[in-house]
Image (spheres, rainbow, N blue to C red):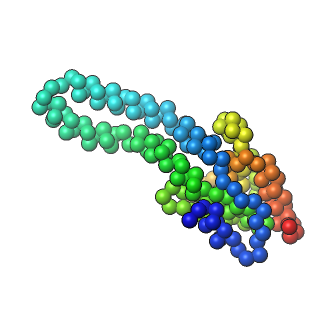
């Protein structure tokens, strides 16, 4: 089932949908691949593969076999940061397919995930602040992120946020959320 269709089931009776969307695919994929973890994973991988190459070319015959018995399991685990980065980059298409946003006159709905999906409903009454973030790729692709902050606190003490990432009409979505938040604060029904 598609992510947007899943969110449709969560909408409570009497709510009117004012926005449906998904993140811009190009921006989403680029942000997943070219993230701050890339240089770390690349350097880690280069060093490990350099060690493996030099160990394999410096030994012969039975010594090489014994060395490989040790090196293969050790470096399979030692390269874990590289495998994590590659897995996240390769699965970015799946995460994009599972990400969707719906805004109703009463709440924000977001679904996301890779293998399992998480669907979040956040009523406008719980949202305290709304902001726009535009990173390098957002600016390049002409999209933006809307961040809705709540009064709820995470285990680490930071405020819970709901992110609507990489949407092309981010200014309109931002204004719509602000209007709906203000309307819900004042008790006005928005149509």
> Which image quadrant is residue 77 in?
top left
Q: Residue furthest left?
A: 62
> Which image quadrant is residue 11 in?
bottom right
Q: Name the residue located 45 percent from the left edge and 42 percent from the top edge.
A: 86
Describe residue 48's horizontal placement relative to residue 168 as left or right: left
Q: Is residue 53 above or below residue 84?
A: above
Asked whether residue 122 is in view, the answer is yes
Q: Name the residue located 79 percent from the left edge and 66 percent from the top edge.
A: 105
Which x, y percent locates residue 146? Answer: 72, 50
Describe residue 141's horizontal placement relative to residue 16 as left or right: left
User: Along the line of sight, which residue is nearer the eye, 87 or 146?
Assistant: 87
Describe residue 179's horizontal placement relative to residue 156 as left or right: right
Q: Name the residue located 17 percent from the left edge and 30 percent from the top edge.
A: 64
Asked whether residue 151 is in view, the answer is no
Q: Is residue 99 above or below residue 168?
A: below
Which x, y percent locates residue 136? Answer: 66, 35
Q: Residue furthest top?
A: 58
Q: Name the residue located 62 percent from the left edge and 46 percent from the top edge.
A: 25
Number of numbered markers? 0
Which x, y percent locates residue 22? Answer: 66, 54
Q: Is residue 4 above or below residue 12?
A: above
Q: Residue furthest bottom?
A: 13
Describe residue 152's horizontal placement relative to residue 35 as left or right: right
- Which quadrant is the C terminus positioned in? bottom right
> Which image quadrant is residue 109 in?
bottom right
- Which quadrant is the N terminus positioned in? bottom right
Which x, y percent locates residue 96? Answer: 58, 51
């Amino acid at each position: 089932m598609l992510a947007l269709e899943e969110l449709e089931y969560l909408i409570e009776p009497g709510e009117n949908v004012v926005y449906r969307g998904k993140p811009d695919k190009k921006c989403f994929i680029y942000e997943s691949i070219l993230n701050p973890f890339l240089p770390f994973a690349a350097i880690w991988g280069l060093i490990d593969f350099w060690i493996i190459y030099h160990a394999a070319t410096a030994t012969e015959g039975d010594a090489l076999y014994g060395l490989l018995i040790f090196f293969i399991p050790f470096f399979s685990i030692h390269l874990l940061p590289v495998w994590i980065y590659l897995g996240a980059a390769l699965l970015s298409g799946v995460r994009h397919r599972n990400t969707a946003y719906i805004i109703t006159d009463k709440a924000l709905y977001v679904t996301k995930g890779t293998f399992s999906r998480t669907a979040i409903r956040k009523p406008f009454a719980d949202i305290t602040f709304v902001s726009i973030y535009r990173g390098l790729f957002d600016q390049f692709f002409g999209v933006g992120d809307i961040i809705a902050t709540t009064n709820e606190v995470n285990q680490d003490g930071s405020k819970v946020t709901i992110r609507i990432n990489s949407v092309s009409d981010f200014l309109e979505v931002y204004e719509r959320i602000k209007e709906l938040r203000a309307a819900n604060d004042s008790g006005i029904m928005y149509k």
